[in-house]
Image (cartoon, helix red, strand yellow):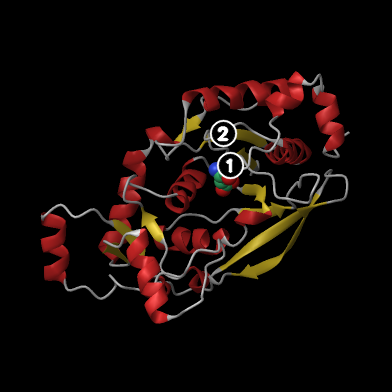
Amino acid sequence: MQPVFRFAPSPNGLLHLGHAYSALLNERLARTCKGRLLLRIEDIDILRCKPEFEHAIYEDLGWLGLQWEKPVLRQSERFDAYGKAFACLKDMGVVYPCFCSRKDIAQAVADHMTEEVDPDGAPIYPGTCRGLSLAEVHSRINRGDEHAWRLDVEKALACIDEPLIYERFEPDQNNNAVKSISAFECYSLRWGNPIIVRKETPTSYHLSVVVDDAQQGVTQVVRGRDLEPATDLHVLLQKLLGLPTPVYYHHELIRGGQGEKLSKSLFSESLAELRAKENTPEDIRRMLGFY
Ligand code: GLU
């Protein structure tokens, strides 16, 4: 089977060196494995994603010399598919509506005096809406109360009768070959009951990524180490939805001069800025260790 890789940026800011590293690594590994490289635009966040950033993604990647298959999948065109997957989870009874605001959660967390946080550093949801009666849920939904949907991870785990594991793989030192490393066990409970459908968007990163990796036949997921814990949830969702589990490699993050994580929200130097300073695509490749 021909391996399928993907690079999946969100057009909510300009790409920086961290994205370039991820894109180039995907390209290099796809070439090494005689695989395919797909690009996916992760634009479910309609408030923060902008057409000019999507355009900049094509421009930056093209400038770097990358080629990808067309048409490019854009998540904003896939809400029907996410809706179907969500309906499946609903039928299984593993999701529940959550009417809490951020403030409600902060208050409940303070009342419970828990310090537990999920791998993203957000407080673990204290479960306020988990036990609401069906009558209350219906009446609140009928009166139009805004709500998200959370995955009841305990219930979800009870539906799965196989071990929750996934395979990891690793490139060799020069990114010229890959070796697989053994099965890795998931620990989905560390996410509490995460949001699976948001209030403002009828999906979430976790749901969309799982549906699309399967739809696009992705077999190798190569992405930053910051997303490694999310894989625990992704594998759980794949099992619930009967979707295949790709193999994963979570690469080191590229850091700035002060050792900080590069981020769009911190205005890390963008590829466009580096280009404007007369850096060539070869300079960028060299900086990132691709010769
Ligand atoms: N869209 C995510 C990001 O830009 C990447 C998601 C993934 O690779 O699974 O960070």
Q: Which secondary structure lies at badge 1?
A: loop
Seen from the viewer's position, the closer of residues 147 and 232 is 147
| Residue 223 on image: x %, y % | 65, 48
Q: Residue at x 68, y 38 (%)?
A: 268
Q: Residue at x 71, y 38 (%)?
A: 30
Q: Residue at x 44, y 80 (%)?
A: 113
Lower sequence index among marks 1 and 2: 2
| Residue 208 on image: x %, y % | 44, 47
User: Where, by quadrant of the figure, is residue 262 drawn?
Assistant: top right
Seen from the viewer's position, the closer of residues 274 and 7 is 274
Q: Give how far apart the Cα atoms at labels 1 and 2 are.
A: 8 Å
Residue under numbered circle 2: 13
Q: Is residue 56 above or below residue 266?
A: above
Q: Where the N terminus falls, by quadrant?
A: top right
Q: Is residue 82 above or below residue 89?
A: above
User: Where, by quadrant of the figure, is residue 34 drawn?
Assistant: top right
Residue under numbered circle 1: 265
Left or right position of 112 against 141:
right
Q: Is mark 2 within 8 Å of ligand 1?
A: no
- Mark 1 and 2 residues: CB-CB less than 8 Å, in contact? yes
| Residue 96 on image: x %, y % | 28, 65
Q: Residue at x 15, y 52 (%)?
A: 144
Seen from the viewer's position, the closer of residues 242 and 90 is 90
Q: Which secondary structure lies at badge 2?
A: loop
Q: Amino acid at mark 2?
A: Gly
Q: Amino acid at mark 1?
A: Ser
